[in-house]
Image (cartoon, rainbow, N blue to C red):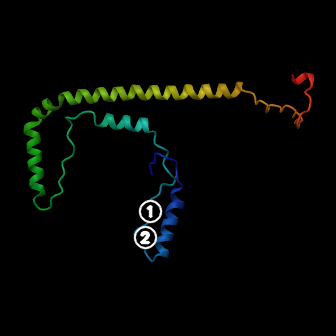
Amino acid sequence: MKLMGRDIPARELLARIEERLRTRGLSTSEPADVPEEGVEPRVDPLSFYLQALEENADATRALPLHTHRGGAGQLVLVAKWAFRKTCQVFINEALSRQRVFNGQVRDSYAQLSAEVIRLRAEVETLRAAQAATQAPTPPPAEAPARPRRTGKQARTPDEK
């Protein structure tokens, strides 16, 4: 499992789900395939999105042909394939500017990601240095309380 939050115990979670299904009278369909090493490591969003931008930067690279249609689906796939083969030059021309823009966005994102990583490291270094220099300060001592005057008591020379 790839999670962007915290890692979860996959085996324990699947066991609890299967137990709840059994208590409700539902059977599990098939055994779940859980990797032996446990949950996959946490995904770093910066590198994940940079990789996605890298994979999809070229707008002229065709996606795999597919159709949701039943019987006539094969005919539709043949028509799509023929269109791509005959018109690829025009598709490339129409999307050339988009391809350049996507490359610039990818490069900018990579640069910003590197800067974020550098700044995070710098912040951690500064926090560690600040924690090392700050000695625990004792709480401030309270001043002794003065007795309250009642009525028309005379003031002492210190209070005037």
The residue at which mark 2 appears reads as 28
Up/down of 82 relative to 59, above or below:
below
Q: Residues within 10 Å of mark 2 (few under 14, many from 20)?
A: few
For the residue labelled by badge 1, is the local secondary structure a helix, a strand or a loop?
loop
**Quarter occupied by residue 56:** top left
The residue nearer to you, when weighing 83 against 24, is 24
Amino acid type of disc 1? Ala
Q: Position of residue 110 (x, y in %)?
A: 39, 28
Q: Position of residue 27 (x, y in %)?
A: 43, 74
Count of numbered badges drawn on the protein: 2
Going by the image, does 127 lie left or right of 88?
A: right
Residue tagged 1: 32
Q: Amino acid at mark 2?
A: Thr
Residue that appears at 51% across and 60% down: 13
Residue 159 in percent (x, y) is at 87, 24
- Horizontally, residue 146 falls left or right of residue 18, namely right
Vertical comparison of 56 with 104: above or below: below
User: Which of the 4 quarters of the picture holds residue 136?
Assistant: top right
Q: Residue at x 17, y 54 (%)?
A: 67
Which tag is nearer the camera, tag 2 or tag 1?
2
The C terminus, quarter of image:
top right
Q: Are marks 2 and 1 in contact (CB under 8 Å)?
A: yes
